[in-house]
Image (spheres, rainbow, N blue to C red):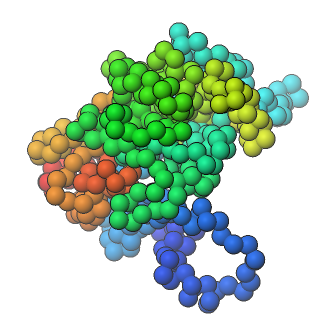
Amino acid sequence: MCYQLSSCAFIPRAISVQLSTNQTSFKSDRAQRVDHLTKIPRSVNMESLQNGYLFPEIFMRECLYAKRNPHARLIRLGIGDTTEPIPDIITSAMAKQALALSTAQGYKGYGPEQGNRELKRAIAETFYQDMQVKENEIFVSDGAQCDISRVQMLLDDSLSIAVQDPTFPAYIDSSIIVGRGGRFKAESGKYKKIVYMKCGAENNFFPNLSTTPRTDLIFFCSPNNPTGSAASQQQLKQLVEFAKANGSIIIYDAAYAAYISDESPRSIFEIPGAKEVAIEISSFSKFAGFTGVRLGWTVVPEELLYANGYPMIKDYDRIVCTCFNGASNIVQAGGLACLTPQGFQALKRTMRYYMENAKILVDTFKSVGLKVYGGKNGPYVWVQFPGLSSWQVFDQILERAAIVTVPGTGFGPAGEGYIRLSAFGHRECVLEASRRLTKLL
Ligand SMILES: Cc1ncc(COP(=O)(O)O)c(C=O)c1O
């Protein structure tokens, strides 16, 4: 099933506000509509944020297209949202837990803020075998995106940061919200105080650390969203050594680790010494289809210490207890079912399906002579269009093939000239997209 554009008839309020209130029209709109103003100034950090968020901008263009072409059949390969049903064994476990809440014996209130013990044990056994990650170092959460922001609270606002370029936008945006990053420079498309570590085809999608300045924090995602490339053991060893030599912390996002098909590490903790320099954030969203269900986790090792020797895990525990209060017990029951042998086998089948989609897309672009990356260790395909801007390519593919992609610059200046396609989609949509793209290109 592909999508009828009428789904855009409902435009969420946040986006309809953006449609009508860009920076220039805001003042006149306000004069007409607002009866009362508070005396609260807008946060300068929020004012520094550019362009809202990438996906609302894409959705806005998609909706404008929908208004002009109400009968077009749109294929969405933009946002990285899972599309295939969650295996029954997992949803049954959630249903059972939900029904138990209606019984005197099965009712449960608050659970441990850090997550249910059984689930933490299953996460440790499934994802961190032989890495000496202990249950108490795992904090179960409502997803990786929330954890990216919670980790920001742990660290002083004055700290400097480095990100891969291109990168998943949440690291930069959440850093700007807490006051790290400085002003945006439109000429370069970069925030003044952020170090952008270029990761392109020319350096095998791994930054040149010999020319990277020291920063306090290094956000690193592998397999990377958007390029779909996974760092090798050797590369991650270099990264850990770099962080250690500089006294920095790596905030490692492993949200796509379950998609790795070669020898690339699935966790930063596969690298000796990483527990002294890294926090790892991960998610059930992409391997279990939990994007709407919401479940993730963060590992803060006991060995990770502040400059004064105080363990970061203690502060993180405090933040989780103060700002979170624990993931839903229904969802955690589902998470536990994901990590049973039958649950995990079923999820592997769905992951294989998405990676077959990725191969169809990779082959499509290769067949028309374009350079295409990713699609092997991660469910994203990263395509280069020399001589065109990525928003131009985005608009052309939307206008002429009714396919939604993501422009590479949405992930940072080094994304210019690229687009990203998501391999999350129904097979018939991906095949139809392949036909339309082959015709267009
Ligand atoms: C690299 C990366 N990290 C984190 C997330 C967010 O994951 P979650 O759904 O667990 O919040 C995404 C979502 O697309 C992602 O691509």
Residue at 27%, 41% in the rendered image: 200
Residue at 18%, 38% in the rendered image: 363
Q: Nearer the viewer, residue 188 or 2?
A: 188
Q: Please provide percent x and percent y for residue 53.
A: 49, 59
**Where, by quadrant of the figure, is residue 133 drawn?**
top right
From this viewpoint, is residue 425 visible? no
Q: Is residue 288 found left or right of 3 in the rendered image? A: right
**Where, by quadrant of the figure, is residue 177 drawn?**
bottom right
Q: Nearer the viewer, residue 308 or 434?
A: 308
Q: Please provide percent x and percent y for residue 51.
A: 47, 65
The answer to whether 232 is drawn above or below residue 78 in the figure is above
The answer to whether 142 is drawn above or below residue 59 in the figure is above
Q: Nearer the viewer, residue 53 or 439?
A: 53
Q: Please provide percent x and percent y for residue 420.
A: 32, 48
Residue at 58%, 12% in the rendered image: 132
Q: Quadrant of the C terminus?
A: bottom left
From this viewpoint, is residue 322 visible? yes
